[in-house]
Image (spheres, rainbow, N blue to C red):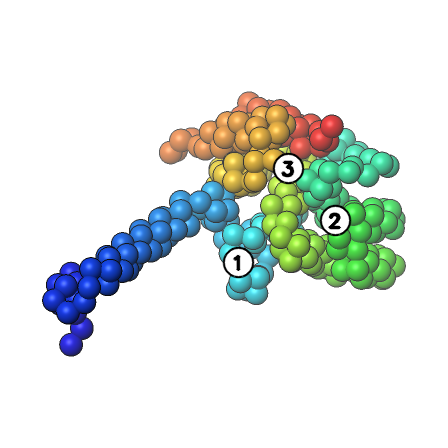
Amino acid sequence: MKLSLPIAMLLLSLVLPAVAIEEARKIEVKSQDSGNVKANDATDHEDAGPAAAKGDIPPDLLDDPHVREELAINEFTAPSISKLFDTLQFLMPLPIMEVERKMPARMSQDRADLAIELGFLIADGFLVVQAEQLDKVEDLAKDLTRYGKALGAGDRVNRHAASLLDSAKEKNVNQLKKELSSTQRDVEEELVTLRDADLAHLISLGGWIRALEVSTVAVDKQFSAERARKVMREDIADYYTESVAGLEPRISERPNYVAMRDLLAGLRTEMTLEAGKEPTPEMMKEIRKIAAQLVELALKRQQ
């Protein structure tokens, strides 16, 4: 028969000296404290952490439904840049010349800067492939190699860079897209291994901002309500608002990230349509303006 601590103490008082009673009291207090600590730990775990802060990824942005399970840590999985760029095939022709940008020749010394710039770079890869400008793949592969090495994922990225060149020579567009998507996943996995999961989210954020820039320019130049709906994804804007807020303070508290978070929150409002309403050219012009501001802030390097 199992006795509760108070009953056990009563029995002890009849047969043991006072010192034993004091020891029994210590055991009871320790047991209570341990229970409180466990309860507090559980509450902290529920209230904190990237998963709670960053929210759920829109289902259509998961490149591989098994990625979360493979990484075993759900909050480390970031939206696929490949999926973000799937929209662009519905927005042809793309304003390639108008949105063209070159990566800086000098590498940043800050890993967060490198991560978000790598997101832009992978996105540009999809842009180049979508526009079938395969002559630009060689420069893309070189830049991917530079950034992969700087982030500590050089070996993984080198393999994909070599495959990108082979696929470009064979003019295999589908394989090029697969290699770019795999590049993001492999770098993400490497960053999780290095306990830099926030950087995986920054790569995805950079890719989305670049995709948003390109798509808003395309729709603004050739507007239709149907094309505008492809861009007006308040759920994605909402996800990235929470994702930026959930980054570790050394990143999220930088002035450009605070400003990005505010813009993203406003963007969600701009992208939300009232029941029975259609997108308008004026709405798209405002979203395009916000997208341009996000690009400027995202590429503002840490001093």
Residue 17, position as x, y percentages in the image: 19, 64
Which label's residue is closer to the chain start, 1 or 2?
1
- Horizontal side, residue 295 vs residue 48: left or right: right
The residue at the point 35 percent across, 48 percent down is: 40
Residue 171, position as x, y percentages in the image: 83, 58
Q: Are marks 1 and 2 in contact (CB under 8 Å)?
A: no
Name the foreground residue: 272 vs 251.
Answer: 251
Q: Which residue is mark 3?
A: 209
Residue 53 seen in the current view: yes
Q: Are marks 3 and 1 in contact (CB under 8 Å)?
A: no
CA distance for labels 1 and 2: 21 Å
Name which residue type carries label 1.
Ile
- Horizontal side, residue 134 vs residue 288: left or right: right
Name which residue type carries label 3.
Ile
Quarter of the picture containing the C terminus is top right
Which label's residue is closer to the chain start, 3 or 1?
1
- The secondary structure type at the circle numbered 3 is helix
Q: Is residue 133 above or below residue 287?
A: below
- The secondary structure type at the circle numbered 2 is loop
Q: Which residue is mark 1?
A: 73
The residue at the point 74 percent across, 49 percent down is: 151
- The secondary structure type at the circle numbered 1 is loop
CA distance for labels 3 and 1: 25 Å
Q: Quadrant of residue 14?
A: bottom left
User: Badge 3: few (under 14), some or many (20 or more) residues near its Cα, within 10 Å?
Assistant: many
Residue 278, position as x, y percentages in the image: 46, 31
Which label's residue is closer to the chain start, 3 or 2?
2
Q: Which residue is mark 2?
A: 151
Q: Nearer the viewer, mark 3 or mark 2?
A: 2
The residue at the point 56 percent across, 53 percent down is: 76
CA distance for labels 3 and 2: 20 Å
